[in-house]
């Protein structure tokens, strides 16, 4: 199991990469959405690692969040997961406004819900 700090560092690298691909203005918005989601994955996993919780899948993360009574965070995670899934498997493109919304969920809403 990776540590809290390792997951925090990976989240930071994901946000740095998001900036390098021009974030909300990314030419390939499906990749921008994927990066947003994986930043959220590492934020969530860092939180769970800090609680001594092990996770192996996206479903595990959501289940652990619910066990910790973090239902709002689990719902936010699910929204980001579904958007990323559409980007990766259904070839969905996203507008700058949509990316702004998902970025805010991952950078602001989810961290607040995990306090």
Image (spheres, rainbow, N blue to C red):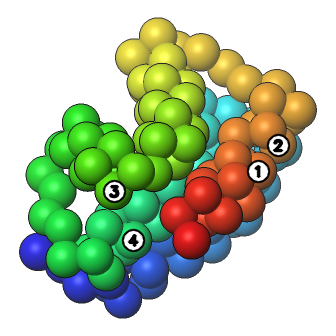
Q: Looking at this view, is 7 or 110 the one in front?
A: 110
Do the numbered discs 4 and 2 sit on residues whose CB atoms are within 8 Å?
Answer: no
Foreground tag (1 vs 4): 4
In percent of the image, x 63 and y 43: which residue is there?
32
Q: Distance between the residues labelled 2 and 1?
A: 6 Å
Foreground tag (3 vs 1): 3
Q: How far apart are marks 4 and 2 (CA)?
A: 23 Å
Foreground tag (4 vs 3): 3
In the picture, measured across the screen, residue 25 lies left or right of residue 88, that is right
Foreground tag (4 vs 2): 4
Secondary structure found at label 2: helix
Disc 4: which residue: 47
Disc 2: which residue: 100
Q: How far apart are marks 3 and 2 (CA)?
A: 28 Å
Give neighbour class at mark 3: few <14, some 14-19, many 20+ (Cα, 10 Å): few
Disc 3: which residue: 68
Secondary structure found at label 1: helix
In percent of the image, x 86 and y 34: which residue is there?
96
Do the numbered discs 2 and 1 sit on residues whose CB atoms are within 8 Å?
Answer: yes
> On the image, which quarter does residue 59 sit in?
top left
Secondary structure found at label 3: loop
Q: How far apart are marks 1 and 4 (CA)?
A: 18 Å
Disc 1: which residue: 104
Q: Distance between the residues labelled 3 and 1?
A: 23 Å
> On the image, which quarter does residue 46 sit in?
bottom left
* Sequence-wise first label, 4 or 2: 4
Foreground tag (3 vs 2): 3
Q: Distance between the residues labelled 4 and 3?
A: 11 Å
Q: Is residue 86 visible?
A: yes
């Amino acid at each position: 199991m990776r540590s809290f700090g390792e997951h925090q560092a990976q989240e930071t690298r994901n946000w740095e990469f998001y900036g390098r691909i021009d974030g909300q203005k990314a030419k390939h918005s499906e990749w921008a959405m994927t990066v947003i989601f994986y930043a959220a994955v590492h934020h969530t996993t860092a939180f769970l690692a800090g609680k001594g919780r092990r996770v192996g899948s996206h479903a595990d993360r959501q289940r652990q969040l619910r066990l910790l009574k973090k239902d709002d965070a689990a719902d936010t995670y699910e929204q980001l997961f579904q958007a990323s899934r559409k980007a990766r498997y259904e070839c969905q493109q996203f507008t700058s406004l949509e990316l702004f919304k998902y970025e805010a969920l991952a950078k602001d809403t989810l961290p607040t819900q995990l306090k």
